[in-house]
Structures are given as structure tokens and as C-alpha cells.
Image (spheres, helix red, strand yellow):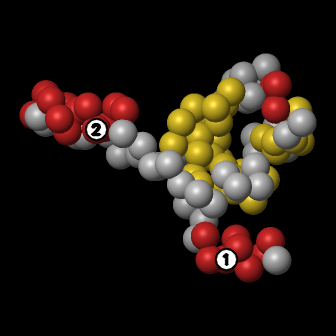
């Protein structure tokens, strides 16, 4: 069972408390009506399928209900860090140094 830390509640709880909400740090087009169908398709459906550390968005569904970001290693399924959505995106090189 995965344990996930909610940065808002400051609790580490079982994965069943949370829902995955996709890749983090995706910039929405400022004017969606001006993009082509292909660009809109890519925005909605095309995501990175990273092997290793991956920026993700999660929601504490059965708790505070808030969204937060995480860096999870897709190989080991281990969370390197979770952080509030308005916090800056952590650098992977620094996270990988800490995890050694």
C-alpha cells in the first residue's frame, strides 16, 4: 500500500484517501478557441509517460479535498516529495541527491 503525504493536512495516509489527477504543471492555452483541433487534442490527451521521477497532481479526496503536486518515481512507485500547488516546482536533481 502506498502512503501519501498531504501537504495541506500535514498527514501521511493510505493511497485510498487520494485520487490521481494527472500530470502536474500543464499550462492551459490562454485562448482555447484559437488553437487547432490537433493542439487541443494534444493538450487534453497527450501526456508524458516518464520512466523515473514524474510530476503529478493528486487530490486528497477523502480528507481536505484539496489538490496538491507530487514527484513520484514511476519505477519504484515511491513519492520523492509532495508540495502545495502554489509552491514552486522542485528541481529533480536536488530531489534525487536527497533520496540517495
Look at the numbered disc 2 and give the secondary structure of its residue: helix
Q: Is residue 71 left or right of residue 6?
A: left
Q: Are marks 2 and 1 in contact (CB under 8 Å)?
A: no
Residue 24 disc label: none
Q: Residue at x 82, y 44 (%)?
A: 5
Residue 94 disc label: 1
Q: Quadrant of residue 35?
A: top left
- Distance between mark 2 and mark 1 Cα atoms: 30 Å
Residue 86: x %, y % from top left: 56, 49
Q: Is residue 94 left or right of residue 4?
A: left
Look at the numbered disc 1 and give the secondary structure of its residue: helix
Where is 18 relative to 52, above or below?
above
Where is 79 relative to 90, above or below?
above
State which quarter of the image contains the C terminus: bottom right
Residue tagged by mark 2?
A: 42
Residue closer to the observer: 70 or 77: 77
Is residue 81 in sight in this rendering? Answer: no
Is residue 46 in sight in this rendering? Answer: yes
**Numbered disc in front, either 2 or 1:** 2
Amino acid at each position: 500500500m502506498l502512503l501519501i503525504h498531504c501537504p495541506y493536512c500535514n498527514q501521511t495516509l493510505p493511497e485510498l484517501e487520494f485520487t490521481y489527477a494527472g500530470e502536474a504543471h500543464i499550462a492551459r492555452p490562454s485562448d482555447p478557441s484559437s488553437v487547432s483541433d490537433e493542439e487541443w487534442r494534444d493538450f487534453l490527451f497527450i501526456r508524458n509517460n516518464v520512466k523515473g521521477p514524474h510530476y503529478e497532481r493528486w487530490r486528497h479526496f477523502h480528507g481536505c479535498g484539496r489538490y496538491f503536486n507530487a514527484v513520484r518515481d514511476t519505477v519504484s512507485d515511491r513519492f520523492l516529495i509532495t508540495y502545495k500547488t502554489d509552491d514552486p516546482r522542485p528541481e529533480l536533481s536536488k530531489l534525487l541527491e536527497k533520496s540517495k
